[in-house]
């Protein structure tokens, strides 16, 4: 048996609430995989779950992670505790981890803690990796003396806009390192050599699985990065796909211009999509612009929904986080949209818009720059989304993909509704 990996995100930070109100940060896509998959591949360890705060206790989602409690010790093969906000650089090796507790730092901050087999969990506050400065690391025990500190190249994702900003660069590195082989070194993809009616502008590879369907009238542009299309992907013309681009299994590109993005599984995409991340099971099946955006699962964007990703004065994007205005320091930032959000036709999203999980925007025109979770937005204003109605819509939407929401998912949204709107609007 291999050593155990546990992701740590008891305090992911308030800026992440648009996503982490309903799911672990480790389940988000970054580059060509989720953050948890990235750490598993880097460390060679199996992830057994996420140590979350109380609001996500019991989280379970098919094909994703489980919320778990802290174990009493490192187990028979040792455990690596890893902060979900820390992402090692593609191609960087994992440090050798042996018989002594070891801390791992990225950019001068503690990202990981290795505990060898049988070692009890430290009780000191902050002993599990919380992103503090490496110089302030706590003592794990008197018998250990000074715990070794290993360094690793990588980045910290302290806010969703950091993930959006860095994703194209990380995705390009992931695709350049991809060789069409699985963990067993058996082929999973082959290089696309062309089809009648499909135009290829070459520069980087195009990797596709055997059952990918690319229709006539499609342009594949790899001058700036590779393109990877996984099992069951369909691309209908006219469409232009621009690398770096990863489209995960069973997603359909229905036309338009899609580039420099990470598209998760079972998505439908149309229109103009650039520099964006879609976690999966979401629809943007109509015209409209989605740029420098982050979408959760089960999002449905109505026809003509578009977001702005550049201020008209070309300044850095500022937004509200828990009542405080935060300067992101970047000039290109679209929308951040939580799980199970739906927008009506003609919805316009401001630069840096934050749309909380479970909300419905049915107003047309410009939506508010910040929408609380489980909120209805209409031309008459905003109101809490009745929770029973929300669950009925959730079940109906997921049934269209033959998925049933878990009781833990419903309970997480129930707690979120009570937190945001109180005990009313049941």
Image (spheres, rainbow, N blue to C red):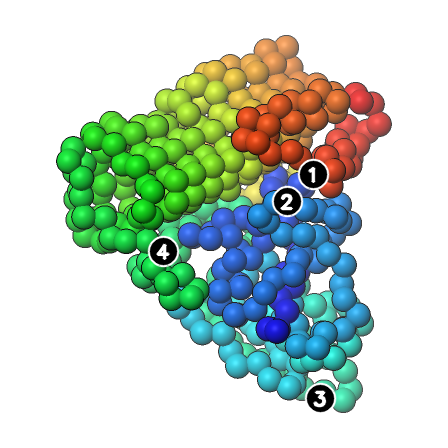
Q: Is residue 86 left or right of residue 305?
A: right
Q: Earlier in the sequence, mark 2 or mark 3?
A: 2
For the residue pair 90 and 419, the one nearer the viewer reads as: 90
Between marks 3 and 1, how big is the CA–CA gap? 46 Å
Q: Is residue 50 left or right of residue 85?
A: right
- The image's mark for residue 145 is 3
Which residue is pictured at 73% across the width and 67% down the height?
126
Q: Is residue 200 left or right of residue 61?
A: left
Q: Element type at marker 1?
A: loop
Pointers 4 and 2 in contact (C-beta within 8 Å)? no
Quick check: can you spot residue 63? yes
Residue placed under numbered mark 1 in the picture: 406
Q: Element type at marker 4?
A: loop
Q: Earlier in the sequence, mark 1 or mark 4?
A: 4
For the residue pair 236 and 155, the one nearer the viewer reads as: 236
Residue placed under numbered mark 4 in the picture: 188
For the residue pair 311 and 79, the one nearer the viewer reads as: 79
Quick check: can you spot residue 316? no
* Foreground tag (3 vs 4): 4
Residue placed under numbered mark 2 in the picture: 61
Q: Earlier in the sequence, mark 3 or mark 4?
A: 3
**In this rendering, is residue 108 above or below 303?**
below
Q: Element type at marker 3?
A: loop
**In this rendering, is residue 378 above or below 125?**
above
Between marks 3 and 4, how big is the CA–CA gap? 47 Å
Query: Toward which corner of the image does residue 104 lie, by quadrant?
Result: bottom right
């Amino acid at each position: 048996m291999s050593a155990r990996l546990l992701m740590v995100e008891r305090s992911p930070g308030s800026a992440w609430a648009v996503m982490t109100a309903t799911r672990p940060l480790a389940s988000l896509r970054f580059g060509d995989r989720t953050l948890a998959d990235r750490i598993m591949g880097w460390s060679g360890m199996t992830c057994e779950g996420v140590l979350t705060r109380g609001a996500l206790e019991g989280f379970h989602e098919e094909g994703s992670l489980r919320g778990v409690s802290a174990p009493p010790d490192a187990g028979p093969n040792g455990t690596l505790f890893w902060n979900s906000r820390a992402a090692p650089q593609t191609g960087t090796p994992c440090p050798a981890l042996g018989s002594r507790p070891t801390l791992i730092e990225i950019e001068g901050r503690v990202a990981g803690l290795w505990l060898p087999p049988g070692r009890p969990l430290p009780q000191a506050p902050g002993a599990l990796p919380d992103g503090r400065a490496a110089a302030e690391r706590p003592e794990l025990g008197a018998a250990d003396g000074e715990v070794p500190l290993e360094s690793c190249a990588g980045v910290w994702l302290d806010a969703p806009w950091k993930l959006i900003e860095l994703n194209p660069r990380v995705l390009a590195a992931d695709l350049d390192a991809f060789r069409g082989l699985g963990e067993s070194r058996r082929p999973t993809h082959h290089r696309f050599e062309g089809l009648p009616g499909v135009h290829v502008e070459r520069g980087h590879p195009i990797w596709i699985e055997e059952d990918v369907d690319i229709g006539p009238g499609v342009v594949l542009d790899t001058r700036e990065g590779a393109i990877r299309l996984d099992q069951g992907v369909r691309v209908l013309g006219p469409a232009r796909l621009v690398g770096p681009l990863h489209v995960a299994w069973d997603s359909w590109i229905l036309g338009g211009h899609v580039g420099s993005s990470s598209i998760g599984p079972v998505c439908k995409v149309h229109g103009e999509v650039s520099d964006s991340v879609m976690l999966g099971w979401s629809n943007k099946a109509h015209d409209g612009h989605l740029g420098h955006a982050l979408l959760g699962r089960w999002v449905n964007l109505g026809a003509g929904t578009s977001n702005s990703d550049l201020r008209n004065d070309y300044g850095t994007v500022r937004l509200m986080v828990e009542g405080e205005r935060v300067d992101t320091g970047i000039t290109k930032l679209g929308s951040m949209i939580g799980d199970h959000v739906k927008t009506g036709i003609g919805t316009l999203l401001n630069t840096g818009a934050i749309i909380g999980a479970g909300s419905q925007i049915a107003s047309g025109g410009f939506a508010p720059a910040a929408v609380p979770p489980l909120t209805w937005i209409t031309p008459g204003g905003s109101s809490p989304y009745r929770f029973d109605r929300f669950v009925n819509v959730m079940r109906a939407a997921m049934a269209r993909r033959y998925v049933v929401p878990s009781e833990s998912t419903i309970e997480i949204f129930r707690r979120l509704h009570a937190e945001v709107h109180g005990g009313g609007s049941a």
